[in-house]
Image (tube, grey):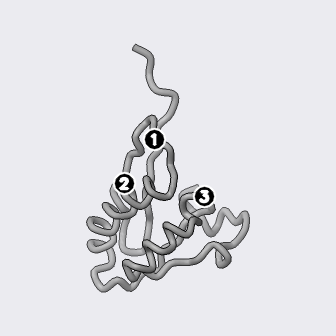
Amino acid sequence: MPHPKGVMVWMGISDNGVTKPWFVQPVAKINSEYYVQQILKPFLKDDYCRLYPNGDAVFQQDSAPSHASRVTQKFLTDQQVQFLRPQQWMPNSPDAAPCD
């Protein structure tokens, strides 16, 4: 049986530690709904609360379409998560995206 061509993993790093890896289903289409339901909700429930129990973090994402979508931004706003909006992101800066 051949091995899959690749694996997609979502992780986060912070001053307080790292998140656990969230593996994306091999056939998944990463749209806003998938990102919110399968990545952000579990991340906020497990890792965000553990790393920032006071909610005093500023969440930063990259420019993936599912990260920049209105659905994702509304979800984060509704969850009272402080985050950098797409217009605040630094363009093409590897220093601002250490995981990349």
Q: Secondary structure at mark 3?
A: helix
Q: Quadrant of the rendered structure where residue 47 is?
A: bottom left
- In the rendered image, residue 76, in percent from the top left (x then y), is placed at 44, 74
Say above or below: 35 vs 55: above
Residue 40, percent from left and from top: 39, 63
- Horizontal side of residue 46 vs 16, given as left or right: left
Mark-to-mark CA distance, 1 and 3: 15 Å
| Label 1 Cα neighbours within 10 Å, binned few <14 / some 14-19 / many ≥20 | few
Mark number displayed over residue 28: 1
Q: What residue is shown at x 44% (from left), y 65% (from top)?
A: 13
Q: Disc 1 vs disc 2: Cβ atoms closer than 8 Å?
A: yes
Give the residue type at disc 2: Gln
Mark identifier at residue 38: 2
* Mark 1 touches mark 3? (CB < 8 Å): no
Quarter holding the C terminus is: bottom right
Q: Which residue does the numbered mark 3 point to in the structure image? A: 65
